[in-house]
Amino acid sequence: MADFLIIGAGIVGLAIARELKRREPAASVVVLEKERQPGLHSSGRNSGVLHSGLYYAPGSLKARLCRQGALEMAQFHDEHGLRLNRCGKLLVPTAPRFAAEMETIAARAVENGVRVEKVDEAALRELEPQTRSATGAALWVPDTAVGSPAEVLRALAAELVAQGVVLRYGAEVVAANPARRQAILRDGETIDFGHLVNAAGLHCDRIAHLFGAGKRYALLPFKGLYWKLDPASGIRLNHLIYPVPDLRILYLGVHTTTATDGTIYLGPTAAPAFGRENYRGFAGVSWAELPRMLGQLAHMVVHDSDGFREQAWQEGRRYFKGKFLQAARALLPGLQARHLLPAAKVGLHPRLFELDAGRLLKDFTIERGERDTHVLGAVSPAWTSAFPLARHVCDQYVFATT
Ligand SMILES: Cc1cc2nc3c(=O)[nH]c(=O)nc-3n(C[C@H](O)[C@H](O)[C@H](O)COP(=O)(O)OP(=O)(O)OC[C@H]3O[C@@H](n4cnc5c(N)ncnc54)[C@H](O)[C@@H]3O)c2cc1C
């Protein structure tokens, strides 16, 4: 019996475990993870950027939680002696049509309380000589940083174990009996719980459905592929370089990330994937779900939901190195195909398709059942936002009616 049973040892599940233990030190908190260690999915395969929170619609959960999350995640790094690259980022328009988008983002940044500064061509050249802006202007975002996701997960898991939280690996939940407050593992073991929290990332909809929650959503995975910049390329970057994104599609576009070990990654993409864990080739293709996934993707293409036609066309092509290079060269004109080295890192974005609306869910969404809470749509910037997101989940859902 666990007072609190959490499914998923990604950053969201672990942050919620920490918050629950803080509030109820005497309670038993158990985290079930199907893999052999934490963070083998999105939380260990992301860019590690502590986003500053400038893109998100004011008032949205993402806007409310991201900025505070970045502060707390940076503090966690400091407290645990983890590497953090406080390099800031530059946002550059890659075509003249993005000038207006840049103004919108600058205005949102002000509303969201994020520090930004418009810079002109001369200042851009000074800050980042090898970068190009289609309009000459750029936005400087000083508070963006790059952290160490794997190190954070290790430190957080160790902290939780020291506090008495039980982390069980190789424990996959495959069924549930909500009326009896039971979760059932693949090996048949039944675990009773007082309250269950679903933080299952790429499987969050399936777990929610076991409890009669999240019925309006079905997950669509999108593949995030990266390339590495050859250190011998001669391209030196002082900051992260991002394109001004198309705000309709909520995808940040191919950008550079300087990891804490100095490796510069280019990417990620956000191309349709064909399985919840379809990281490479045909491995992990969800054959049984493929017709559903293809149907929902086709629906969004036909209806051009939130600019999806352009996203599918652009991102789908970026599976090919030549097209990926084209996107990256819009930021770094000196980049050549030979400068792109294969990267082992690949992640999957767990986007939720809203069945009624026929479009992708935009914000973090949480649903509560009788004795169960489901974190849905924990896509970027959920890594950045994890600690305040955990508080929000506890305040507004787990402890809302008890
Ligand atoms: C390519 C990419 C780049 C990104 N870059 C950034 C970034 O720079 N900054 C940022 O803030 N965010 C970024 N994100 C988003 C961020 O990584 C995610 O929002 C975050 O990691 C989600 O965490 P999670 O705990 O919800 O999911 P996960 O990390 O996927 O954890 C869920 C866990 O649940 C487990 N699980 C699933 N089903 C079961 C089951 N039935 N039983 C038991 N266990 C189960 C899984 O094995 C997994 O470990 C990025 C995402 C991707 C894909």
Image (tube, rainbow, N blue to C red):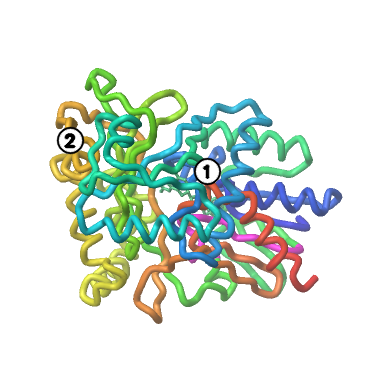
Badge 1: few (under 14), some or many (20 or more) residues near its Cα, within 10 Å?
A: some
* Left or right of residue 288: residue 69: right
For this orientation, the residue located farthest to the bottom is 356
The image position of residue 58, as x and y in percent, is 51, 65
Q: Per the image, is 197 magenta?
A: yes
- Looking at the figure, which quarter contains the C terminus? bottom right
Tell me which residue sits at (21%, 59%) in the image.
Answer: 97
Q: Please report whichever mark, 2 or 1, sits nearer to the chain's N-terminal start.
A: 1
* Left or right of residue 193: residue 243: left
* Image-quadrant location for residue 355: bottom left
Tell me which residue sits at (57%, 62%) in the image.
Answer: 375
Instruction: Out of 292 and 221, give the one closest to the viewer.
Output: 221
The image position of residue 274, as x and y in percent, is 29, 57
* SS under mark 2: loop
- Looking at the figure, which quarter contains the N terminus? bottom right
Check disc 2 and report the residue beneath it: 333
Instruction: Out of 339 and 291, give the one closest to the viewer.
Output: 339
Amino acid type at circle 1 is Glu
Q: Per the image, is 75 magenta?
A: no
Check disc 1 and report the residue beneath it: 35
| Residues drawn in magenta | 194-207
The image position of residue 146, as x and y in percent, is 48, 35
- Is ligand 1 within 8 Å of the beta carbon of the residue shown at mark 1? yes
* SS under mark 1: loop
The image position of residue 341, as x and y in percent, is 24, 28
Separation (CA) of disc 2 from disc 1: 41 Å
